[in-house]
Amino acid sequence: MPNNNKKKKIKSLYLGGFILAVSEAIIAYVQSSYLNQFYNLEIVSWIFIITYIVTFFIINKYPNFIARFTNLKTAAFSLLLKVISLLIFICFPNPISVFIGFILFTVSFTLAFINFDIFLETFTSDEKTGRIRGIYFSIYNFGWLASPFLSGIIVDYSGFNTLFIIDIALALIVLVLLLWNFRALPNHYAEKHFEIISTFKEILRRKNIKKIFEVSFILHFFYAVMIIYTPIYLNQYIGLSWSEIGLVFTVMLIPFILLQYPAGYLADKYYGEKEILTTGLIIMALASFIIFYFHSYDLLAWAVILFFSRIGASLVEIMRETYFFKKVDAKDIQLINALRSITPISYIIAPLAVGLILSFLQIEYVFLFLGLIILLGLYPALTLKDTK
């Protein structure tokens, strides 16, 4: 493919990734509270568990659907599925419908993210992986930046349905963008069939890939706990309003914009990934311990603490992406898919673990436990073989 055309495709993915991020982010930090309107907190945890069990099994069949129907058609399907789920929330606001809609919503954005991974990897060379992924994730996370603040204001003043209508519009824009730019892209996987067991064996065989999967699980366990339980903790136990929480979360996400491209560049050019990855994990663990000890109603302090936590997470995330995608290419669709399946696994295990903790201890102990879990990630990070 000519270089100019390749650059055009990558830029369209940057734009699509940004809109997809806004579409995901305006819902992400209010979803547990939306569910909490229909179910108590214990049931909400079980809804997340069931939803991500379903998501996990669908993800692991997804490469075969991509091989059969193409990456573009499956991406279009996932975006339309998201629209359907949001219409269910708007038109049928009852416990059973909301449960079904939540499963469809979660499955849809997870699948769309996999499709974007494959599109991006198709046009990325190994020597530029850190920079291209760094730019992509910086733009993607820029979409997350203002979204919690906006969603907090919208929910406070207009309710959840307005949020869902906006999300429908964003999903349709992404759909049109993909159909316009990738309609002529050939199917590279037409004759392939992928099996979970063979993928698992491949991960175990490649020791460094296995280690980056372990670090990825730690990262997504952190995200699962933070996304599900931090909004509830800040709102119901600390006493912050939703607009205040939205402002705090907006500040919290700034490191993803500021740090991921420079970190990816440094990993490509100078350091490799191991040192930056390890630093990020240590910062995440320290921030989790601080959350456990801090109970004050102080908006600035909470913004600083959560900002600090995402400095660590942003470094771990981009190093995970840089390392992994230097080790694979677009034909390794089963490994790319397996990496993204870690998200539902973490969202299954995290609520189970937290539910057990909440049976005996107060909610702040969840963050002490989280810090200890993050420290377990130091061993695979420190023993990882750098690409430099």
Image: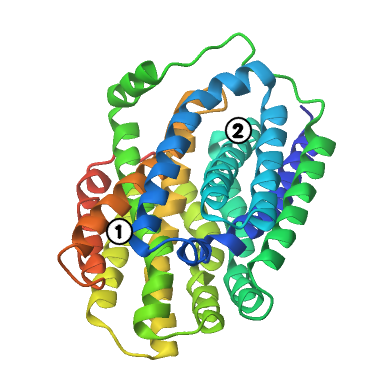
Residue 270 visible at all: no
Residue positioned 50% across, 79% down in the render: 245
Q: Is residue 195 above or below residue 310?
A: above
Residue at numbered disc 2: 118
Q: Residue furthest left?
A: 360
Q: How is the image coloured?
A: rainbow
Q: Point out residue 386 in the picture as x, y percentages from the top left corner.
A: 34, 41
Residue 346 visible at all: yes
Q: Residues within 10 Å of mark 1 (few under 14, many from 20)?
A: many
Q: Point out residue 139 in the picture as x, y percentages from the top left corner.
A: 64, 58
- Dot 2 falls on a residue whose secondary structure is helix
- Dot 1 falls on a residue whose secondary structure is helix
Residue positioned 23% across, 48% down in the render: 382
Residue at numbered disc 1: 281
Residue positioned 29% across, 21% down in the render: 205
Alpha carbon of mark 1 to alpha carbon of mark 2: how far? 27 Å
Please name the amino acid that badge 2 sits on. Answer: Ile
Q: Residues within 10 Å of mark 2 (few under 14, many from 20)?
A: many
Please name the amino acid that badge 1 sits on. Answer: Leu
Q: Quadrant of the C terminus?
A: top left
Tell me where residue 117 sits by quadrant.
top right
Q: Point out residue 263 in the picture as x, y percentages from the top left corner.
A: 47, 57
Toward the viewer: 306 or 369?
A: 369
Q: Of the residues under marks 1 and 2, which one precedes in the sequence? A: 2
Horizontal placement of 320 versus 262: left or right? left
Q: Point out residue 40 in the picture as x, y percentages from the top left corner.
A: 38, 63
Q: Is residue 189 above or below residue 367?
A: above
